């Protein structure tokens, strides 16, 4: 028999206050002393209390009776990205085995859209959320802090500093480093990274991986080596046309790593329109390893994210939080990002320019024509 979910009465009894005081703390609706507020919050955490969306016992019972089963939801950032489709499919399969329905909503990289989706799903009595948060220095994350304050179960697919929440992610820095190191090993000395959108922490993590690969070589890393692109096909296409039209042939990159596979595919179309061959003229690397890549005439080298594992682990972790009788401590899982070498990368045309690792590379002056450090 399923254990009864703790009620506001249970919280009030444990904290030694009235139900009205508990409600005031939960809703910030009236002044409560700091001592009392902490006592109520301690009781909420100890009991793993979660406020039901429906008001009143009768409404709560009606809501439960109306549902065929329990429900969790995932909030993604880009509805047109197949990357999320693979995560959702795996999470849905895992949830179904446990008797849960999975809903999927997209914020489209919009703060207000994410906030509205989170609050609506919570109001609809969804039991827990998997969230790929919209993040940058200007992001309003109050709705996620509110979930934490209300002890509402959620799991993140990108880390939010300052929010002690469960997380499933990959080592983006290492994955990006491997991609650039692969190009360096092939003899490329003019390498550019097409960076992702500002609303993702993965953007900066993957730039950090590029920087780390440069630091382990004799190549110099500069601002011109990062082009702000985005996350969509048109972003890679647009930035590819702009970059290669703006630079003289002798300064064009011969190797490009991209924020994701969609950007890489858009770039490949731009290169084809400009009469440039992949990989003979330009080697291209994506990130994610979406399923369609191996069906392309020229399969794309990419960094594989284990999206199925990510979806399954996130759903399993969330359901464990939902069903826990006590508070489950946050857990972080980082999955390995593996480089998948395919036909879109090859040796640099500039043969013999292989760069050897240099432990003190920052001490070398730079030849700006080749962007190599001079011993």
Image (spheres, rainbow, N blue to C red):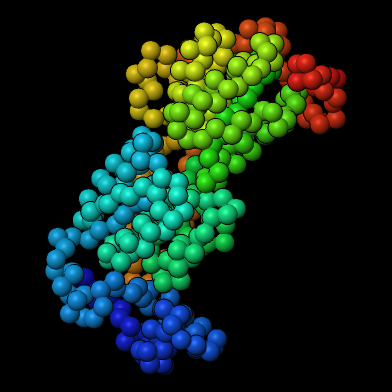
Q: Residue 28: x, y in percent? A: 45, 80
Q: Residue at x 55, y 86 (%)?
A: 34
Does 153 appear above or below 182? below
Side of 131 where 8 appears, left or right: left
Q: Residue 262: x, y in percent? A: 44, 29
Does 251 appear above or below 72? above
The C terminus - image quarter: top right
Residue 359 lies in quadrant: top right
Residue 29 lies in quadrant: bottom left
Q: Residue at x 66, y 10 (%)?
A: 249
Q: Nearer the viewer, residue 16 or 239?
A: 239
Side of 230 where 247 appears, left or right: right
Side of 338 where 107 appears, left or right: left
Q: Residue 50: x, y in percent? A: 35, 73
Q: Residue 161: x, y in percent? A: 57, 57
The N terminus - image quarter: bottom left
Q: Residue at x 23, y 81 (%)?
A: 56
Side of 327 where 279 appears, left or right: right
Q: Residue at x 81, y 31 (%)?
A: 362
């Amino acid at each position: 028999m399923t254990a009864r979910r703790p009620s506001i009465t249970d919280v009030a009894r444990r904290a030694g206050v009235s139900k009205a005081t508990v409600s005031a703390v939960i809703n910030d609706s009236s002044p409560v002393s700091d001592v009392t507020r902490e006592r109520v919050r301690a009781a909420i955490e100890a009991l793993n209390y979660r406020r039901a969306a429906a008001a009143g016992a009768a409404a709560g019972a009606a809501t439960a009776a109306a549902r065929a089963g329990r429900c969790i939801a995932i909030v993604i950032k880009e509805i047109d990205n197949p990357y999320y489709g693979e995560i959702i499919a795996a999470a849905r399969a895992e949830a179904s085995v446990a008797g849960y329905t999975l809903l999927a909503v997209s914020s489209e990289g919009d703060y207000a859209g994410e906030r509205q989706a989170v609050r609506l799903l919570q109001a609809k009595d969804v039991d827990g959320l998997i969230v790929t948060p919209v993040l940058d220095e200007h992001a309003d994350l109050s709705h996620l802090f509110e979930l934490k304050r209300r002890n509402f179960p959620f799991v993140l697919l990108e880390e939010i500093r300052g929010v002690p929440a469960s997380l499933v992610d990959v080592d983006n820095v290492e994955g990006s480093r491997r991609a650039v190191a692969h190009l360096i090993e092939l003899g490329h000395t003019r390498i550019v990274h097409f960076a992702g959108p500002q609303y993702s922490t993965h953007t900066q993590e993957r730039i950090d991986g590029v920087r780390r690969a440069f630091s382990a070589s004799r190549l110099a890393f500069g601002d011109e080596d990062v082009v702000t692109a985005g996350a969509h096909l048109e972003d890679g296409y647009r930035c590819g046309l702009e970059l290669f039209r703006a630079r003289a042939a002798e300064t064009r990159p011969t190797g490009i790593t991209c924020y994701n596979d969609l950007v890489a595919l858009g770039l490949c179309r731009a290169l084809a329109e400009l009469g440039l061959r992949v990989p003979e003229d330009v080697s291209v690397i994506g990130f994610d390893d979406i399923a369609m890549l191996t069906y392309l005439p020229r399969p794309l080298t990419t960094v594989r994210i284990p999206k199925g594992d990510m979806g399954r682990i996130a759903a399993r972790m969330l359901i464990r939080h939902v069903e826990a009788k006590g508070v489950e401590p946050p857990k972080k899982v980082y999955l390995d990002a593996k480089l998948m070498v395919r036909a879109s990368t090859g040796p640099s045309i500039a043969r013999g320019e292989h760069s050897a690792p240099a432990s003190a590379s920052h001490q070398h002056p730079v030849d700006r024509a080749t962007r190599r450090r001079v011993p």
